[in-house]
Amino acid sequence: MSPDASSPTYAGEIRVPGGAGAVPGTITLGEETLFVAADGSSPRTLGYRDLAVLAITDQVGFIATDAAPGADRWLLERFGAAVGPLIATLRERRLRQRLADALVE
């Protein structure tokens, strides 16, 4: 699945902790998934339920699939004023998806 043209997209720089440095990247929000693309690479597709850590400090967002070492992690830098609403939206969609999962079980 790939993002469609009408999906909200946020642009800035994405840094992988421990990586060489921040590179241009985007976060695109789909209905059931989000897409993380750094430096023109193929986007990494994740369900909102897969996000274990969503944090923000000093205009830098942090998203991770798990708190354990080796998990997918990204620092969202230079997203400007959009980083706060982006993290809030990710939290809300994660909660909605997890609640829907619980109803299915």
Image: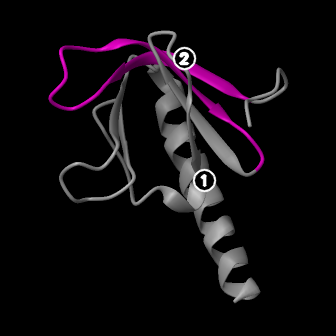
Q: Position of residue 87 (x, y in %)?
A: 50, 44
Cα gap from disc 1 to disc 2, whole angstroms? 19 Å
Mark 1 vs mark 2: which is more N-terminal?
Answer: 2
The colour scheme is one colour
Looking at the image, residue 76 sits to the left or right of residue 57; the answer is: right
Q: Position of residue 8 (x, y in %)?
A: 72, 29
What is the count of numbered marks? 2
Residue at 40 percent across and 60 percent down: it is: 52
Is residue 69 or residue 14 the one in the foreground?
Answer: 69
Q: Quadrant of residue 30?
A: top right
Above or below, 83 relative to 42: below
Where, by quadrant of the figure, is residue 93 drawn? bottom right
**Residue nearest the viewer, comparing 78 with 26:** 26
Magenta-drawn segment: 8-31
Identified at 60% across, 53% down, the residue is 47
Indicate left or right for 74 with 79 as reference: left
Q: Circle 1 is placed at which residue position?
A: 47
Amino acid type, mark 2 = Ala
Query: In what element is the residue under mark 1?
Result: strand
Q: Residue at x 29, y 50 (%)?
A: 71
The residue type indicated by label 1 comes to Gly
Number of the label disc, if any, that sits on residue 11? 2
- Magenta stretch holds residue 38: no
